[in-house]
Image (tube, rainbow, N blue to C red):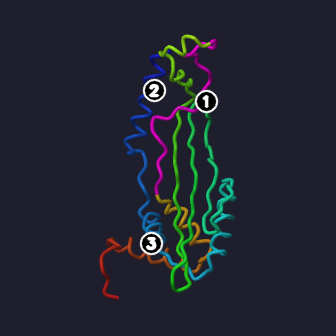
Amino acid sequence: MRPRLSTWVTAWLLVGASGCAVTRDPRQQLLETTSANAVYKLPPDALLEATRQLLAEQKYELLPSVDPLYVHTTWRIEGNLDSGASWSKIFVQVHPTSNGRAVVRAYRMAYTTIGRAMSHPSLGAGDRDSKLAQVPTGTYVLGEPLSPSKPVVRRAPDFEWEVLERVEPRFAAFLETRAQHYLALGRDPSEPTEE
């Protein structure tokens, strides 16, 4: 049974690492890219309050911060830690501009685990002091979740789009209309227009 399990875990990791299982929606990708360049007329306090509400709705727990323009969360875990889970954190920074406006930058730290691993033996398993110790070294106890990689921090344009939809719904609706127009014409939105 153990060889079969390792084969399945290896196959699952290869499929996950290849990234071929998910194709992004071009409309949503266009909207998220556009929202990443949004500059808000709202004061930073109002933007942060909307951000906090959105994070709470998405089941993130906020951590205290000494920076009044920064919000971050604890890990949100989806899945079963014993078999595999997706961990994520959100970091949001509001940057005031010189003309009284503000920009929102959101980042997500993502971490995937594939079950629990035994903790590593102590670092001193082979030196002289460990042989003299009363407690045997190299013993294993139930450890932390095992991950094939380290956490990855990336920009979170999907979250920035949700902030834009929340605080500027009319502008978000306008952008959705423009995105539909570009996609209906089959044009690349980055091409210059003659309008």
Image point 32% across, 73% down: which residue?
187
Main secondary structure of the magenta stretch = loop
**Residue 31 to residue 125: above or below:** below
Q: Secondary structure at mark 3?
A: helix
Distance, label 3 to label 2, CA atoms, is 40 Å
Residue, disc 3 = 34
**Residue 143 to residue 167: above or below:** above
User: Residue 112: x percent and y percent?
Assistant: 51, 40
Residue, disc 2 = 8
Relative to 53, is 192 on the left or the right? left
Considering only order in the chain, which callout, 2 or 3, is on the residue closer to the N terminus? 2
Residue 139 is marked as none
User: Residue 163: x percent and y percent?
Assistant: 59, 69
As shown in the figure, which amino acid type bears the numbered disc 2? Trp
Q: Quick check: marks 2 and 1 in contact, CB under 8 Å? A: no
As shown in the figure, which amino acid type bears the numbered disc 1? Asp
User: Residue 85: x percent and y percent?
Assistant: 57, 38
Residue 82 is marked as 1
Q: Secondary structure at mark 2?
A: helix
Instruction: Give the camera-side residue of 8 and 134.
Output: 134
Number of on-image labels:
3
Question: Range of the magenta residues?
Answer: 134-154
Q: Quadrant of residue 62?
A: bottom right
**Residue 138 to residue 80: above or below:** above
